[in-house]
Amino acid sequence: MKNRDWLFIDENRIHNFRSTGVLINDGKILIQRGIHDTEYALPGGHVAWGETSADTLIREYKEEMGADISVERLIWVEEVFWKWGVRDAHTICHYHLVSINSPTQIPLNGVFKSLETDESRLIFQWVDVNELQHYKVYPVFIKDKITNLSDGIEHFVSRD
């Protein structure tokens, strides 16, 4: 039986646990967007029940890009309160610094699509960390934090 995502939905609320990878190469960060979207986020996905947030990233990068990664360390934890359609949403997200195991598995610059699977609706793009200010990217705090990563774990609470 496939593990279910850590995602709880009722008529008024959504609660979910996500894990996100921060992949930086040669001064560029990998971001993603839906094929028809204009807003960007960092690659990752819902944590499955019984799965660690690090294991989620290993699975998601493999499923969406065909890439094998190493999870270096947890850098940020965010609690986000926002609207998901008409529902109130509460997301907890772990952000891990990750590295690519084999630089030949994905393009290391430019734009590329996700693998031809259910996730083929994603576009990945490398952006210079100093140019990230010009993109509508979530979480918003990344624009300030990406050029000055703390040695410890930082905690953020966001309310949209």
Image (cartoon, rainbow, N blue to C red):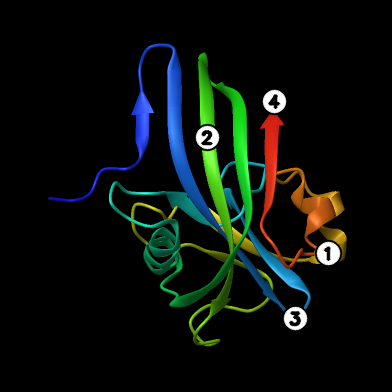
| As drawn, 81 above or below 52 | above
In the picture of the structure, the residue carrying the numbered disc 3 is 26
Q: Quadrant of residue 64?
A: bottom left
**Relative to residue 2, is residue 121 drawn left or right?**
right
Is residue 138 visible in the rendered structure shown here?
no
Image quarter where the C terminus lies is top right
Instruction: Tell me which numbered mark, 1 or 2, is placed earlier along the sequence.
Output: 2
Q: CA distance from mark 1 to mark 4?
A: 24 Å
**Residue 160: assigned label:** 4
| N-terminal label among 3 and 2 | 3
Residue at the disc numbered 1: 148
Q: Position of residue 99 (x, y in %)?
A: 57, 77
Mark 4: give few (<14), some (14-19) or many (20+) Cα within 10 Å: few
User: Residue 87: x and y, percent?
Assistant: 49, 16
Give percent across and percent down for residue 26.
Answer: 75, 81
Residues at marks 1 and 2, CA–CA distance in whole angstroms: 24 Å
Q: Is residue 103 visible?
A: yes
The label number, if any, that marks residue 91 in the structure image: 2
Q: Earlier in the sequence, mark 2 or mark 4?
A: 2
Q: Is residue 8 left or right of residue 132?
A: left
Q: Closer to the camera: disc 1 or disc 4? A: 1
Question: Which amino acid is tagged 3?
Answer: Asp
Rounded to the nearest angstrom, the CA distance separating label 4 from label 3 is: 32 Å
Gap between marks 2 and 4, in whole Å? 12 Å
Q: Nearer the viewer, mark 3 or mark 1?
A: 1
Q: Earlier in the sequence, mark 4 or mark 3?
A: 3
- Going from N to C along the chain, the mark reached first, 3 or 1, is 3
Instruction: Please report the residue visible at 32 percent of the width from the left and 43 percent of the height from the top.
Output: 5
Question: In the image shown, does 81 or 150 lie closer to the viewer?
Answer: 150
Q: Are marks 3 and 1 in contact (CB under 8 Å)?
A: no
